[in-house]
Amino acid sequence: MAREKTTYTFGDMLISKKGKNEFLEKVSILINFKKIEKLLKKVIPRKTKVGTPEYSHILLLKILLLETWYNLSDMGVEEQLNDRLSFIKFLELSVDSKIPDHSTISRFRTKLLEKNLMGKILLEVNKQLEAHNWLVKEGIIVDATTVSSNRHPRKMVEIEEMSKDREEKEEVKISYSDDEEAKFLVKGNKIVYGYKCHVATDKAGFMLEGFVTGANESDVSNLSGVLERVDLEEGTDIYCDKGYSSKGNDELLKTKKLNNRIMKKGRRGKALKDSEKKYNKILGKTRYVIEQSFGILKKWYGFSRMRYIGQEKCELELYLKMLTFNIKKGVLKLTP
């Protein structure tokens, strides 16, 4: 019996030869997207309106990844998908395939938010990275970074100073902005109007979990919220800067049987001892990794300013940043 011949269009051959992108090709090798698709199918039914094309969940998720890596809007990525062969190849489409429009992409992102799926997707990707022994939770680092709102306040209002020995001061008045959940924070000479991302990483800088609050939320009061989101074994080292130093957090770590690696903080009238300064310096050699990760997100992922408005949507954006950051970090570890 003669073997059936596979036919290829000119467009397919063009994609194969010209649609090369080493990074995206390595992403496809590294990540098992079928496992993620299985997760999505359980929660989001593939139902469309009569007459509209049906797109796979994983295709739409990959589009969100492309948006994040290449700093594109929904409309911007739609234009690129009609023109960029490497994107088409990454999505496993042909040149004559129907491309999702910007409204379809937006609706899918809303579904991810409604079904609270981003944390589960990040966990699945991290499990795959852990299988390579790259992501290891022998110790975790917790820190927070501020990100400006997508909107500017229309009017600067009075800022209330808290106690003099606090490094951060909070805004408690009306913001006069359409991003009502964004908050003011004064830190040193810098005024931020926006949000604060509370994040945990492993010692290599892979991002494990995170959430978003108003910028005026203190670091010290959100350590428990971060730890609750990460599956930790007893005896895990928890590294934090001095902004997390408090009797409450000391007791929290003791109760959870986690090793306290919070940097020592000087008090009014009580400077740090030389031994405490030396201890902080040792911890800093591990803790700097998370600051480095934040720096990469802000410089290369456009995460100095939020793309969306509202705390929930900004938290979804944080998850997309963490997800794409971890995948790219994993790709860089692949042998050439």
Image (cartoon, rainbow, N blue to C red):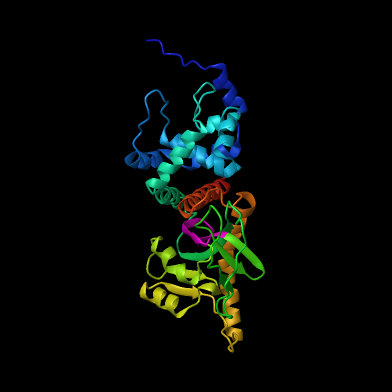
49 horizontally vs 61: left or right: left
The one nearer the camera, 66 or 284, is 66
277 horizontally vs 203: left or right: right
The one nearer the camera, 40 or 213, is 213
Residue 15 belongs to magenta span: no
Which quarter of the image is occupied by the C terminus? top right
Residue sitting at x 54%, y 23%: 95
Residue sitting at x 57%, y 77%: 166
| Residue 77, horizontal then vertical, whole percent | 57, 35
Residue sitting at x 57%, y 64%: 184
Type of secondary structure dominating the magenta stretch = strand
297 horizontally vs 229: left or right: right
| Residue 100, horizontal then vertical, whole percent | 49, 30
The one nearer the camera, 188 or 234, is 188
**Above or below 123: residue 242:** below
Q: Which residues are magenta?
A: 194-214
Numbered label tally:
0
Does residue 302 appear in the picture of this structure? yes
| Residue 11, horizontal then vertical, whole percent | 56, 20
**Residue that sits furthest to the right in the current view:** 189
Residue 200 belongs to magenta span: yes
Residue sitting at x 46%, y 34%: 104
Which quarter of the image is occupied by the N terminus? top left
**Above or below 68: residue 152:** below
